[in-house]
Structures are given as structure tokens and as C-alpha cells.
Image: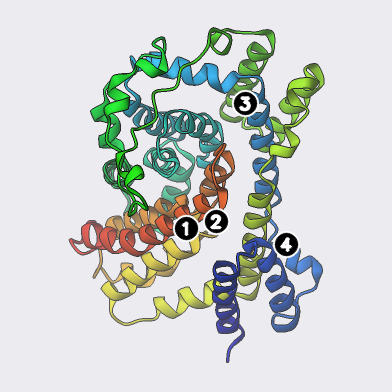
Amino acid sequence: MSPELISILVLVVVFVIATTRSVNMGALAFAAAFGVGGLVADLDADGIFAGFPGDLFVVLVGVTYLFAIARANGTTDWLVHAAVRLVRGRVALIPWVMFALTGALTAIGAVSPAAVAIVAPIALSFATRYGISPLLMGAMVVHGAQAGGFSPISIYGSIVNGIVERENLPGNELVLFLASLAANLVIAAVVFVLFGGLRLWAQGAVDETAPAAGNRAAEAAPVPQRAAPRTAELRTRPAPATPTLSPESTSLTPSRIATLTSLLALVVAVLVFDLDAGLTAITLAVVLSTAWPDDSRKATGQIAWPTVLLICGVLTYVGVLDEMGTITWAGEGVGGIGIPLLAAVLLCYIGALVSAFASSVGIMGALIPLAVPFLERGEIGAIGMVAALAVSATVVDVSPFSTNGALVLAAAPDVDRERFFRQLMVYGGIVVAVVPAAAWLVMVVPGWG
């Protein structure tokens, strides 16, 4: 058995044990990286740690630390109230506002994880307060980021268009952008319908100034039947009343003003000065903690440490796979298939599967050159193939093992994180299974370019 195949089988075992024994998958992945890296790939400790995502570790810690402080001093409550007023009380519009906001940020040049790091904590806090599915809100944020991610001036768009130019392939920047925008918009619409968006729309506008008990529309709203009820009481239980915000939670205190200024500074630092989101967030959190220690005392305990362990462990193992050449081995095996359309759909699936655990840009940079031999023969349109690879490799970033999915998982307050992790993993698996085939069918089979 080849080392590459062994490394893939060990990854499957890690998933099975983590799922059946409720062991943190990150801890298992660290152990697997040690065993496979040392015994199979003959890597030393430096080689194993080469895949440790230090930048993502800092982003997860820094962003969750900063927003834990924002929750503690009431800043997120104030932002939620402001968002409700902005859409005139229509809660159903908020997921679309978050979709558009992250899309606009990435379209004008923000790196996708940076945009998600900025928007996700606010969006998930809003979801918690108003009973919106965290999976719905998190998916809208991530798909919004990818919807704008391939504009001609975006990071992803510039990188992919540069690879296409370097490989002397036909390219179309507008088609690439519109393909990603359309794909993510369609997925967002489906997610909105399936995970409670229509129910939110049917409830109409909310009035935060009204007493919670007096919200008759909310009391009369049907309870969504997501699972079989255990008792008759569950079938007849009214929906929770719309939450109200006290004047204290909607007023601006010095600590909230400072926190809002820090959040604005984070946006400017990342988008304008291209500073690291994680290091900037930690610095701002330390400043706030020093100025208002009472509000910040428990914030470090609210950093999503289990999520940090999970993501860093899995990505370290993926780094071992990369060091061993497993990813290149799989890609070259597919690229050597003599049937171009079959090779194209398999490359899309490899891009989606690997990107669910690793860098989207990195996998696109590896797969586009692998597609060059059969693209040069003219049997498949290069423009459509590149667009399909780009969509397949980025739309799966809602996976909890990707940077964006990890940020969403870490940012969700007051949720069962293990359950939310499973939801994201299942949803990510569905996206991996469905979207590459759909992208291939729509973009590759017609022969664009």
C-alpha cells in the first residue's frame, strides 16, 4: 500500500473515531499527524509543524477575544438594535444584509476570511437574539464573501486571473466574477428557504419598543417542525416572543464607543492598511481589557478554544498530506485520465474536497495547471473550466474545517458548539457532493471559452 493511500485512510479513521466517540477531532488529527508524519512519511517535528496554521490560530483567538469583550459590555446588543432599525424591523432582511455586506467587502479587495471575521460575530449575535438559525446566518455570511470574491479587483480574482495568464489560457474576468456571484446567490436563496427564512419573512416587522408579551404575531407564529415532537406540549407551544432591548442596552457608554471604534479600526486596518486581522484584533482587545478590566475579565474564557484545537489539528494533518505529496498524487492521477469531461468533473471534486480542509487559493493554484494539458487540446472550454474550478474550490468554505467555516463556528454565541459543528460539517458535505457536479454541468459541459 502506498504512503499516500495510507495517509488518506488514516484521515477517514480520524473522522470515524471523532464522530462515534465524541473525541475532539483536532486532538486526533495531531496524533495522526505525529504517527503518519513520523512513521510513514519520515518527517521530523519541524516537518510536521510546517502545516500548523499559525495565522489562522491567531485570527480565531484574536477575533473571538475581541467580540467576547463586545458582548460583555453590550456593544453587540447595540449593533443588533441598530441593524433592526436599519431594515425597519424586518428581521428576515438581516441575513441578506450580511450576505451583501461580506460580498461588498471581498469585491473591493478584502481577503475572504478577513471579511467573515469582521461580519460573522455581529451576524451570529443577531441570529441568537432573534431565533434565526445559526446555520442560515453563517452560510449567508460565507456565501456572501464568496459571491464577491472573484471581482476583477478582488484578491481571489486577481490570483486566478494571474494564473490563467501565466499558463497562457483564454480568460474572462467578468465571466469568472459572475459565475461565482450567481452560484453563491442561488445557494444562499436555497439555504434561506430551507432554514427558516420564509418563516421570518411571514412574521413581518418587529417592534423592539413593544413589551415582549404583547407581541401577538410572534405568539401566534407556528413552531417549525424540524424534528418529530416528543410530546403534545411541544406541538402546541407558542414561538418565543420577540426579545426587547432595554434603554441601557441601546445607549452608548464610553466602553461601547471605544469598542465600536475598535471594530471600525479593525475594518480599516485590514482593508486599507492590509494588516493581519488576528494580530490587529488581539491588540485592540488588549487595549479594551486594560481600559475596562471588569467588562473584559471573563473574555479570555470565552475564546473558542475547542474550535481552535479542532481546526489547527485537522489543518496540521492536511499539511502533512501536502508534505507527503498526497494532494499532488491524487491530482496527477485524475489529470492523466484520457476522458477530458470525466477528468474535469473529478478535478472539480478534488478542488472542493481539499479546499474544505485547506487553502482555496492554494488548491486553485495547483489544479488549474493540472488541467492545462487537456485544455490546450481544445476539447474543453478553458473559461468554463477555470470558472467551475474556482466555484468548486471556494463555495465549500462553509465547512467548519476551512478558515471561513471555523470563524463562523467560533463566532456563534450561546449555541451548542458540538451540534453546530455537526450541522456545518453535514452542510459542507452536501455542498461538496452537489456543487462541483452542478458547476461542471453548467460551466464545463457547454464548452464556455
As displayed, is residue 317 above or below residue 143? below
* Residue at point 28%, 72% (across, down): 377
Q: For this rendering, which residue is in front, 277 or 96?
A: 96
The Cα–Cα distance between marks 4 and 2, rounded to whole angstroms, is 18 Å
Q: Position of residue 95 (x, y in %)?
A: 37, 32
Foreground: disc 1 or disc 3:
3
Q: Amino acid at mark 3?
A: Arg
Helix, strand or loop for disc 4: loop
Which quadrant holds residue 275? top right
Residue 425 tag number: 1
Helix, strand or loop for disc 2: loop
CB contact under 8 Å: marks 2 and 1: yes
Q: For this rendering, which residue is in front, 188 or 127?
A: 127
The Cα–Cα distance between marks 3 and 4, rounded to whole angstroms, is 35 Å
Q: Amino acid at mark 4?
A: Ala
Characterize the local packing of mark 2: few (<14), some (14-19) or many (20 or more) Cα atoms within 10 angstroms: many
Residue 50 tag number: 4
Characterize the local packing of mark 1: few (<14), some (14-19) or many (20 or more) Cα atoms within 10 angstroms: some
- Please identify the residue farthest to the left as the structure is shown: 446
Q: Position of residue 202 (x, y in %)?
A: 23, 29
Q: Amino acid at mark 2?
A: Phe
